[in-house]
Image (spheres, coloured by chain):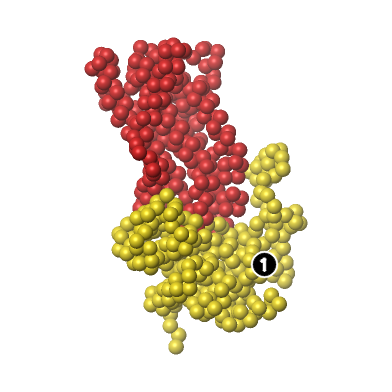
Chain colours: A red, B yellow
Amino acid sequence: MKNKIIISNKGVTSNEDKVSLFIKWRYFLTQLIINKFKNFYKQTILGPFWAIINPIIFSGVFTVIFGKVANLPTDGAPQFLFFFSSVIIWNLFRSSLSSNVDLFVSSLPIFKNSYFPRILVPLANLIECLIIFSIQIFIFVFAIFFYKYKFNFTISIDLIDFLKIFIILFYIIILSFSFGLIFSCLNSKYRDIQHMVNFGMQFLFYGTPIVYSISMIPENYKFFFLVNPLVYPITLFKSITIGSQPPEIDYIYSSIIILVLALPISLKFFSYVERHFDDYI
Amino acid sequence: MTTYKKKLLEIKNVNKIYKFGTINYSTLIDEIQEFFSNIFKKKKSYMTRSADNNLYFNEKIANKSFFALKDINLSVYEGQAIAILGKNGSGKTTLLKCISRICFPSSGHIEVNGSIAPILNIGSTINPELTGLENIFFIGAMYGMKKKEIQIKQNQIIKFAEIEKFIDTPVKRYSTGMNARLALSIVIHLDVDIFLADEVLTVGDQNFKMKCIKKFKELLENDKKSIILVSHEIELVKMICTHAIVIIKGNSSKLMQIDEAYDYYNNLSN
């Protein structure tokens, strides 16, 4: 039995629920993800190895600049591992946010030609970032074991820590996804946003304890770090994986408040813009 | 003899309003004011209906907006082929977009009782980096096909597009004609109830055009599909469609026989 739908200015009313819609369109989702990877690695020789090379080179550069030259303390962890864990968790956030910012502009040809649930495209971007991240974390685990045998670096991770890591990853995914959606919606009308996001990312990169340890935050600047929702999850991730200083509990509040606000707002906003983007893009 | 026919599509009093000029306001202050007035004030109605059942804009937006579609009414039953005639910019494509959920009507509603395949901007969805075969799977999936369905129809699609030799070549090396043939051939093999075809018959050479028309006729007669066709090529339209509506500056005529519609349309343009 085919579904009956009614299209009006309020959107589409149909008797299909979200789950059955998702099952119906899951093949398109896999096609979008495959397509992204194919586009990304077409006519490259190293192909997916770039996902591995990228964090290694970045953490190498950070080790030289922030570790050797600037001599920032790493709370006793090996410098390369310290920067590696920072880079992969930051990259997950940055890539999954910025891949969605010009969503409506870059997907315009397929959006203008046929109907499918628009949320599939940002979802595919997110899953792509997650796949790349899971390759990188595999390399990271490998690097930890390497340091364990070579340099007697010890880190013990129990089951609770594993659970914590999953919660942190889940948190970062949801946060970057909802901010990605909000920015993509704004960007569909005001193209200033994509320039602003570039700057914002730079500010956030230096405003979060990524290349430095949380122990270095001066007391009178602490307020700026308290409102930054990334401070808690990223420093917690680093403290679990490489044993740097864990964050104080004060930092968790802004993380929770911003997540609780951002996700519903972004979904609501996105469903509004997907109805109207054709009028003003 | 009257046979029962399922109503696939019903368009009721559909209006679509667009604004003239650029969208963004001139200053940031204007933009912020607009944003807050949207949040706090009640939504004003844009239009009023006068006594003679005609729609008018409210004074405030009258010189900034126009009707792309105005009070469109249309019903489509299964097996029906309807042409939409009209000059450039008269709202034909907007109507198809509204039916296919790409944009939404400003008021009125559309009831859809089946699946729809919009063929609007043929060729733009093709990803030039991928090969022909990869594009078949991607576009098929975009129109809601399952993997198995595409695998079954894959050979039919390739044969119809006449690109057997080039199927594993990236599409960026295709000629324009091949590109368009591939796109159309994927869409024409979809298992949907209504095809919305916008200027698809301009694709390809005479041979391919006739093949498309034959395929459309098969779909209409054997499979009881419906087609809404927008085209400026009179002879080709007459071969497929039996009925037509004429849209003039967003206003539509009633459903007419195709010859009658063409007379009406030609009289208008003279």
Q: Which residue is mark 1?
A: B249
A9 lies above or below A129: below
B217 lies above or below B124: below
Report the residue that reaches farthest toward the bottom: B1
Q: Nearer the viewer, residue A266 or A75?
A: A75
Q: Nearer the viewer, residue B13 or A27?
A: A27
Q: Is residue B54 left or right of residue B143?
A: right
**Residue A184 visible, this angle:** yes
Q: Nearer the viewer, residue A4 or B256?
A: B256
Question: Which residue is at a point 64% across and 64% down the rendered structure image?
Answer: B89
Could you classify mark 1 by the number of other residues whose Cα lies within 10 Å: few (under 14), some (14-19), or many (20 or more)? Answer: some
Question: Which residue is at a point 58% across and 82% down the rendered structure image?
Answer: B259
Q: Locate residue B52: give its quadrant.
A: bottom right
Could you tell me residue A277's position as x and y percent?
Answer: 57, 50
Quarter of the image with the N terminus of chain A is bottom left
Q: Locate residue B46: give its quadrant.
A: bottom right
Tag 1: amino acid: Lys
